[in-house]
Image (spheres, grey):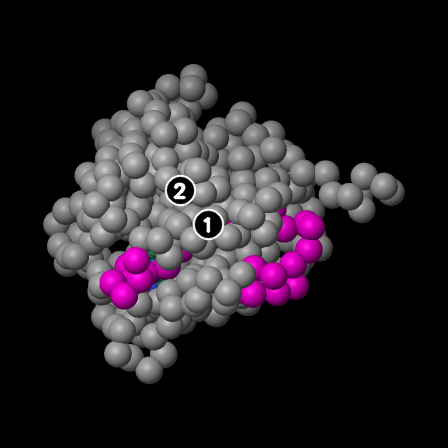
């Protein structure tokens, strides 16, 4: 079908609230008409979230960089004998959480490597200790890759691990570790990591155990447009089944200091397209998040008109993409996030992890 007719067909589907198929997705990945793609993504974005643009006050904690997976796209991982390999003690995790702590912090986002020298009890302890010390802070922790690993080292089933961590105080799961589901690509970029199918299986178990989660896709490395659309459709299918996903976050590949260093950083064009196409394909996801750390505040601002309704948060300390050459700051202040959103003409909504609006004490009193 010629380009114009194809775009018209997609437009009619979007306006009627009909689902886009693989062929539509592929067309959108390749069409030069980024303005029409943005317009359509904005229709869905405003239908679902009006003028709201969400952000959260959170802190990232990466407890260990030692990882046996050795993914080729990762600059954060270290082997145990490398000089800058680290594993925080529980006291150090607590200290990191306490640093500049304020009651405004709604979430700790905790992910790390698969470190063979640490027992499952350590990972559980992190959750139990933080939950006890910060009962009002939501703990979003451990990718499905980590959960599958905990099952392996503890002798428990995935379901038992999830239940055990829930009892310890785990609130929800982040969306990391999904990379790209295509087995062919996974064999090249992360051959030791669990398969795409396993990622989806463990996520399904998490949703069945009552956890909400996010989902991600790492793009801009060696994957094709077909791989990206396949990834989105597989997420959409799981969401049809469980309804457990809150937000989708496309993660822009950063090549520096990785085994794929010959690759380029992603362009603004691709970042914006990936967000808009995700908004259009993932009709059963409520939120599309631009992680400003990876794609920069200016592109995130623009993205608020290309399908995005969430720009993540204050973050405070980011190690994974900054090890791989991210040129952004590691942290934004509340007023920095708010003014970015206001300047873009959207209405900022401070949220908790589960997308409930948070009224800050200071605002409530004024
Ligand atoms: O799983 C690793 C990715 C992820 C690189 O759920 C890289 O709200 C780019 O998942 N270049 C961890 N990306 C981060 C993550 C995340 C971030 C923000 C919000 C949420 C959420 C989740 O980072 C990893 C991997 O896919 N990653 N190396 C790199 N060189």
Locate the C terminus by quadrant: top right
Mark yes or no: residue 146 visible.
Answer: yes
Residue 171 appears left or right of 277: right
Instruction: Tell me if residue 222 is in the magenta stretch.
Output: no
Q: Secondary structure at mark 2?
A: helix
Provide the residue designation for mark 2: 165
Query: In front: 18, or 244?
Result: 244
* Residue 34 image point, x, y percent: 42, 44
Which quadrant of the figure shows ligand 1?
Answer: bottom left
- Give the residue pinned by disc 1: 127
Which of marks 1 and 2 precedes in the sequence?
Answer: 1
- Residue 227 location in percent, x, y? 22, 44
* Left or right of residue 89, residue 5 in this image: left
Locate residue 6, reporting x and y percent.
30, 29
Residue 249: image quadrant is top left
Which residue is the extreme one toward the bottom?
Answer: 83
Residue at 61%, 61% in the rendered image = 98
Tell me what residue is drawn at x 29 percent, y 34 percent.
159
In this view of the protein, can residue 272 be seen by the observer? no
How many labels were placed on the picture? Answer: 2
| As drawn, 42 above or below 143 | above
Viewer-proximal residue among 200 and 262: 200
Q: Quadrant of residue 71?
A: bottom left
Task: State the SS at label 1.
Answer: helix
Q: Which residues are magenta?
A: 95-119
Q: Give the Cα distance between marks 2 and 1.
A: 7 Å
Q: Quadrant of the N terminus?
A: top left
277 sits to left or right of 358: left
What's the residue at 56%, 35% (across, down)?
355
Q: Is mark 2 within 8 Å of ligand 1?
A: no
The residue drawn where x is 59% and y is 40% is: 352
């Amino acid at each position: 079908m010629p380009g114009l007719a194809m775009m018209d067909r997609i437009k009619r589907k979007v306006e009627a609230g009909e689902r886009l198929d693989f062929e539509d997705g592929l067309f959108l990945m390749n069409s030069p008409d980024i303005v029409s793609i943005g317009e359509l993504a904005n229709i869905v974005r405003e239908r679902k979230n009006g003028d709201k643009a969400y952000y959260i006050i959170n802190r990232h904690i990466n407890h260990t960089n030692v990882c046996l997976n050795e993914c080729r796209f990762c600059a954060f991982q270290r082997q145990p004998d490398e000089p800058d390999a680290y594993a925080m003690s529980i006291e150090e995790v607590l200290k990191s959480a306490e640093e500049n702590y304020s009651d405004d912090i709604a979430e700790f986002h905790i992910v790390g490597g698969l470190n063979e020298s640490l027992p499952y009890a350590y990972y559980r302890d992190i959750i139990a200790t933080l939950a006890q010390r910060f009962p009002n802070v939501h703990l979003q922790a451990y990718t499905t890759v980590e959960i599958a690993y905990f099952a392996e080292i503890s002798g428990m089933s995935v379901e038992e691990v999830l239940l055990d961590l829930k009892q310890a105080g785990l609130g929800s799961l982040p969306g990391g570790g999904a990379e790209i589901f295509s087995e062919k690509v996974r064999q090249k970029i992360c051959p030791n990591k669990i398969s795409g199918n396993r990622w989806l299986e463990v996520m399904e178990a998490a949703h069945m155990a009552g956890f909400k989660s996010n989902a991600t896709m790492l793009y801009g490395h060696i994957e094709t447009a077909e791989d990206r659309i396949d990834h989105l459709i597989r997420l959409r299918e799981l969401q049809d089944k469980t309804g457990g996903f809150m937000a989708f976050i496309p993660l822009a590949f950063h090549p520096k200091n990785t085994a794929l260093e010959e690759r380029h950083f992603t362009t603004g064009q691709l970042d914006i397209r990936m967000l808009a196409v995700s908004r259009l394909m993932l009709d059963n996801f409520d939120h599309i998040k631009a992680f400003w750390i990876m794609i920069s505040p200016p592109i995130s601002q623009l993205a608020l008109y290309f399908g995005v309704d969430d720009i993540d948060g204050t973050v405070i300390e980011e190690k994974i993409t900054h090890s791989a050459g991210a040129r952004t700051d590691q942290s934004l202040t509340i007023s920095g996030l708010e003014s970015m959103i206001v300047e873009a003409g959207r209405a900022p909504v401070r949220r908790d992890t589960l997308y409930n609006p948070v009224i800050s004490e200071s605002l409530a009193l004024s």
